[in-house]
Image: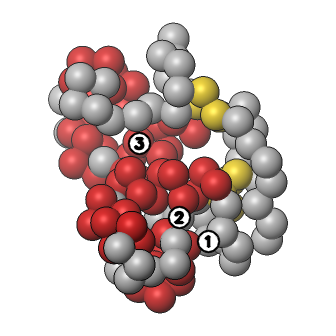
Amino acid sequence: YLCYQYKFSTNNPEGPCEEGEEAYGIFYPDVKEGVAAGHFENMFAHYVAFGKEEGKEYLCYQYKSYIDDPTEMCPEGEELYGKQYLDVMEAVSIGVFENMFSHYQSFGKLEGKEYLCLK
């Protein structure tokens, strides 16, 4: 697999998008459970009501497909993995790991963590 250049929107989306729903559910499994239990209509509804204020991100990509088990580091994977796993970001910042992808390869994948790259 290859990771390609990308641009994603951090603007306030006007409504739900497929990739936003998927990623939000992966990064915030408690919200996914709330949606499944009927507490929220969808992930976007949680983002609007609480997530944005809590600092969560709901991202809609220009390119809609991604590689969920990449073999190479990619910018969006580095950014999202670091935002989701602050302890790993700290470990990278002090030199324990070279980058987020190296943590994902060594430990994160086995721990069930997601490192996503756009196709």
> Which sits earlier in the primary sequence, circle 3 or circle 2?
3
Q: Is residue 112 something one can see in this rendering?
A: no
Say what amino acid the circle numbered 1 marks.
Asp
Q: Nearer the viewer, residue 85 or 97?
A: 97
Crowding at mark 3 (Cα within 10 Å: few <14, some 14-19, many 20+): many
**Contact (Cβ within 8 Å) of mark 1 with mark 2:** yes
Task: Please identify the quadrant where the N terminus is shown.
Answer: bottom right
Q: Is residue 93 placed above or below 116 in the rendered structure?
A: below
Is disc 1 placed on a helix, strand or loop?
A: loop
Residue 37: horizontal and vertical position, in percent?
A: 20, 39
Near mark 1 (Cα within 10 A), the count class, few <14, some 14-19 or many ≥20, is some
Q: CA distance from mark 3 to mark 1?
A: 17 Å
Disc 2 marks which amino acid? Tyr
Using residue 30 as the reference point, say whether residue 85 is left or right of it.
Answer: right
Per the image, label 2 sits on a secondary structure element best described as loop
Residue that numbered label 3 is attached to: 24
Residue 103, visible in the rendered structure = yes
Q: Mark 3 touching mark 2, by CB under 8 A?
A: no
Q: Check disc 2: other Cα within 10 Å, few if <14, some if 14-19, many if 20+.
A: many
Point out residue 71 in the picture as x, y percentages from the top left corner: 69, 77
| Residue where numbered disc 1 is placed | 69
> Residue tagged by mark 2?
115
Q: Is residue 13 left or right of residue 3?
A: left
- Give the residue drawn at x 53%, y 64%: 115
Residue at 70% x, 73% y is 72
Residue 25: % across, % down: 38, 46
Say whether disc 1 or disc 2 marks the residue closer to the N-terminus. Answer: 1
